[in-house]
Amino acid sequence: MRKKILAIAVAFLSFTTLHAQNSDTIHRKHVIRQSILPLSLIAAGSIISGSTFEKNLQTNLRNAVGNDYVFHIDDYLQYAPIAELYIADIAGAKSKNHWFDQTKYLLISNILTASITHGLKFITAKTRPNGGVHSFPSGHTTFAFTNATVVYNEFIDSSPVLAYSGYLFSTTTGVFRMVNNRHWLSDVMVGAGIGILVTNLVYYFEPLKNFNPFKKTKNVVVIPTIDYNNYGIYLSYRF
């Protein structure tokens, strides 16, 4: 399985790099460059999955923090980039897209990454460090990096600090999945790679680009609110 995932990642990178060399489209070359890091994470994570190195690293990490240590901050930090996105909108920060398009790409990206992640979980059936099931890749990490990459794409041209800040929360989420003994390093690396890669591709292809019934209502912001027990909508109007 690791060899198959690695082969797919290398083949995709080789094809897209060659394609970019024969194209004059700057946008296309940019997305190819953006794909190098996530594909590298997916490839490296696939290589070390189940390795002695990975097992020893997890053992040493748990010994360092204490085998009974649990701190569920990762359950909440994964949502931080979403909060950043809409708080910035309410505050009037300049973004690449209208808030409805942001929400559209956020939902599409999360649907795609969640489908890939959960599909791999059942295909690989990898055991978690704590003995649980469906370890590979990390769903929390995939979700967090998907959200962070949406923030990156929306604000990289207008506010680089805000754009990169989402990755601070997503990286911390991944680290604490390991600290809490829920995931191995490879699970986190591949989850991060999937989140970044798929979201960048969504922003490249811009599905449903022309669908925006709220485009002329710039003062209205509708924000989906999600937690473990509740779902809702937050409505904001700026006078």
Image (cartoon, rainbow, N blue to C red):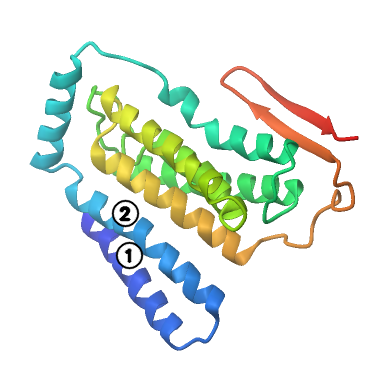
Which quadrant is home to the C terminus? top right
Is residue 146 found left or right of 171 in the rendered image?
right
Tell me the residue that label 1 is attached to: 8
Label 2: few (<14), some or many (≥20) within 10 Å?
Answer: many
In this picture, is 12 found above or below 22? above
Total marks placed: 2
Say whether residue 219 is visible: yes
Which corner quadrant of the image does residue 123 belong to?
top left
Q: Position of residue 236 (x, y in %)?
A: 81, 31
Q: Position of residue 91 (x, y in %)?
A: 72, 37
Is residue 8 found left or right of 131 in the rendered image?
right
Using the image as rendered, state which of residue 224 and residue 89 is in the foreground. Answer: 89
Q: Position of residue 47 (x, y in %)?
A: 19, 53
Tell me the residue that label 2 is attached to: 42
Residue farthest to the top? 68
Is residue 141 found left or right of 102 in the rendered image?
left
Using the image as rendered, state which of residue 158 and residue 79 is in the foreground. Answer: 158
